[in-house]
Image: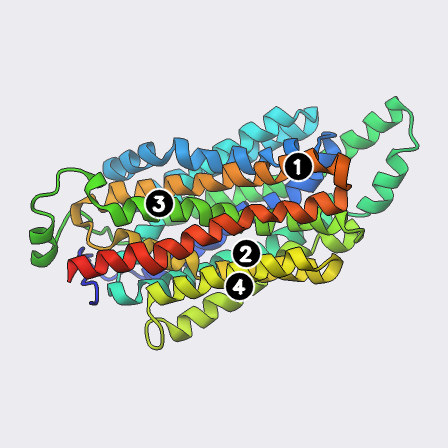
């Protein structure tokens, strides 16, 4: 049974720039900011002299903001609307980026984490606005296609971000780390301070871009959408509903998103450090995140072509979960470049999960769409939980297995995540559709 659109998006006047273009620019920006973390993890591990577990708190600080800010984000959008809320999110992200300047000057890890948390808070507002907007701005059955287009904007930024930042902050990093071991404490401190200062100029540029985009969004003709309106069918179905928890497909969808984002960020943010653990030079490994995100872009293109013409959103999610399981097992059974290649291919498996989970989880929510969206944003906190667990596993087992094998076998954490996503796609959501019919 096809899901009928539950929300209208009335437009009072035709904007000069298409809403799709504006939202695409937003997805590019927060994709760029998000995937800088893949370089910041190995960079701050060296600059602040951290272990694996500590270095992955880069992801925790950034993504836990989505859990903390999910409810406030819904409040901000209710108060200011989608357009002004997006501008506010960009300004908050700029404030977080500014904090990187004193963090770099003092080389204090906790200040870096504060900056990342504030950036993540701004991103939570943007995500809460942009994802339901693009989901309901057109026909429900093609929502995954529209989100796939946004995903290309997001992941193309992710391809560029680690290359751009890595070229600056990880320049000659292999020689740097070799030389660092030979220095006395005073010389070592001076070199680490110089390394930390490399991040200042890139983040000044990021602040400028974020503020310019915030102003452009504020003065744009981006139309508001009415997420409280329900068509007759959805209104009748929801007449007896008094709580968001009466939509079990949403609750399971939030958990599936929680697991998916954890898996995606592990695949993208750990691959550089994993490559280095496999005795691949860091000067080469710094490009690996771009390979992961390039495979995601390929998956998005497949989604745009195939959804819903050849495959439904639900079946696409089933296939994606199966591919995640296959590529994870392949990574565990291979080594060095072959294993790294399998981790990069997880980008292909992950690509259609976000575009599919959102419309499946939001289907039929009607007036509960805003709160449902904020709950899905809370699911992004999976990236705050699972990458540090991966890092902890590496630290825990490296004494007995060695760094290379510990980093390798710690990818076992991905299997239960993909299995749950398969459960949601193949059984839980399918059951919901059957009941709705």
Who comes first in sequence, dot 3 or dot 2?
2
Who comes first in sequence, dot 2 or dot 1?
2
**Which residue has dot 1 on it?**
200
Who comes first in sequence, dot 4 or dot 1?
1
Percent coordinates x, y for residue 327 in the rendering: 58, 61
Q: Secondary structure at mark 1?
A: helix
Tell me if 249 is positioned left or right of 383 in this view.
Answer: left
Discs 4/2, front: 4
**Residue 12 in sight from this viewpoint:** no
Percent coordinates x, y for residue 259 in the rendering: 45, 46
Percent coordinates x, y for residue 349 in the rendering: 51, 61
- Label 3–label 1 contact, CB within 8 A: no
Disc 2: CA contacts within 10 A as few (<14), some (14-19) or many (>=20): many
Residues 160 and 243: in front is 243
Discs 2/1, front: 2
Give the alpha-carbon distance from disc 3 to disc 2, as whole Å.
25 Å
Who comes first in sequence, dot 4 or dot 2?
2
**Residue 176 in sight from this viewpoint:** yes
**Which residue has dot 3 on it?**
254
Who comes first in sequence, dot 3 or dot 4?
3
Give the alpha-carbon distance from disc 4 to disc 2, as whole Å.
16 Å
Give the alpha-carbon distance from disc 3 to disc 4, as whole Å.
21 Å
Q: Secondary structure at mark 3?
A: helix
Residue at 79 percent of width and 53 percent of height? 280
Discs 3/1, front: 3
Tell me if 177 is positioned left or right of 267 in this view.
Answer: right
Who comes first in sequence, dot 3 or dot 1?
1
Q: Using the image, tell me which numbered label, if any, was put on residue 50.
A: none
Q: Quadrant of residue 356?
A: bottom left
**Which residue has dot 2 on it?**
157
Give the alpha-carbon distance from disc 3 to disc 1, as whole Å.
36 Å
**Which residue has dot 4 on it?**
348
């Amino acid at each position: 049974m096809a899901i009928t659109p539950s929300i209208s998006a009335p437009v009072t006047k035709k904007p000069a720039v298409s809403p799709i273009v504006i939202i695409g620019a937003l997805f590019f920006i927060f994709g760029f900011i998000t995937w800088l973390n893949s370089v910041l993890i190995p960079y701050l591990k060296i600059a602040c002299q951290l272990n694996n577990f500590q270095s992955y708190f880069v992801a925790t600080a950034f993504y836990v903001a989505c859990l903390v800010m999910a409810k406030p984000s819904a409040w901000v959008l209710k108060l200011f609307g989608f357009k002004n809320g997006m501008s506010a999110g960009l300004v908050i992200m700029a404030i977080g980026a500014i904090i990187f300047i004193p963090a770099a000057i003092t080389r204090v890890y906790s200040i870096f984490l504060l900056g990342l948390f504030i950036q993540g808070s701004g991103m939570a507002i943007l995500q809460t606005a942009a994802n339901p907007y693009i989901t309901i701005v057109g026909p429900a059955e093609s929502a995954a296609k529209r989100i796939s287009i946004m995903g290309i904007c997001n992941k193309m930024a992710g391809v560029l971000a680690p290359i751009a930042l890595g070229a600056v902050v990880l320049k000659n990093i292999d020689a740097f780390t070799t030389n660092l071991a030979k220095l006395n404490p005073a010389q070592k401190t001076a070199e680490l301070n110089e390394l930390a200062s490399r991040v200042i100029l890139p983040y000044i540029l990021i602040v400028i871009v974020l503020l310019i985009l915030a102003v452009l969004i504020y003065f744009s003709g981006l139309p508001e959408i009415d997420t409280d309106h329900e068509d007759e069918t959805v209104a009748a179905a929801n007449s007896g509903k008094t709580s968001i928890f009466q939509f079990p497909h949403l609750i399971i969808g939030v958990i599936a998103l929680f697991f998916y984002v954890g898996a995606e960020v592990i695949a993208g943010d750990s691959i550089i450090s994993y490559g280095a653990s496999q005795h691949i030079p860091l000067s080469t490994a710094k490009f690996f995140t771009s390979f992961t995100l390039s495979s995601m872009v390929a998956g998005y293109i497949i989604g745009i072509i195939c959804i819903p013409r050849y495959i439904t959103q639900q079946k696409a999610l089933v296939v994606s979960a199966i591919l995640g399981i296959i590529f994870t097992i392949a990574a565990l059974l291979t080594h060095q470049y072959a294993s790294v290649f399998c981790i990069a291919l997880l980008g292909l498996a992950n690509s259609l999960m976000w575009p599919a989970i959102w419309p499946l989880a939001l289907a039929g929510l009607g007036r509960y769409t805003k709160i449902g969206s904020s709950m899905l944003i809370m699911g992004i906190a999976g990236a705050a939980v699972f990458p540090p667990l991966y890092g902890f596993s590496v630290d825990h087992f490296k004494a007995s297995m060695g760094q290379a094998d510990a980093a390798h076998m710690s990818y076992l954490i991905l299997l239960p995540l993909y299995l749950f996503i398969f459960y949601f796609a193949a059984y839980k959501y399918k059951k919901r559709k059957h009941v709705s019919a």
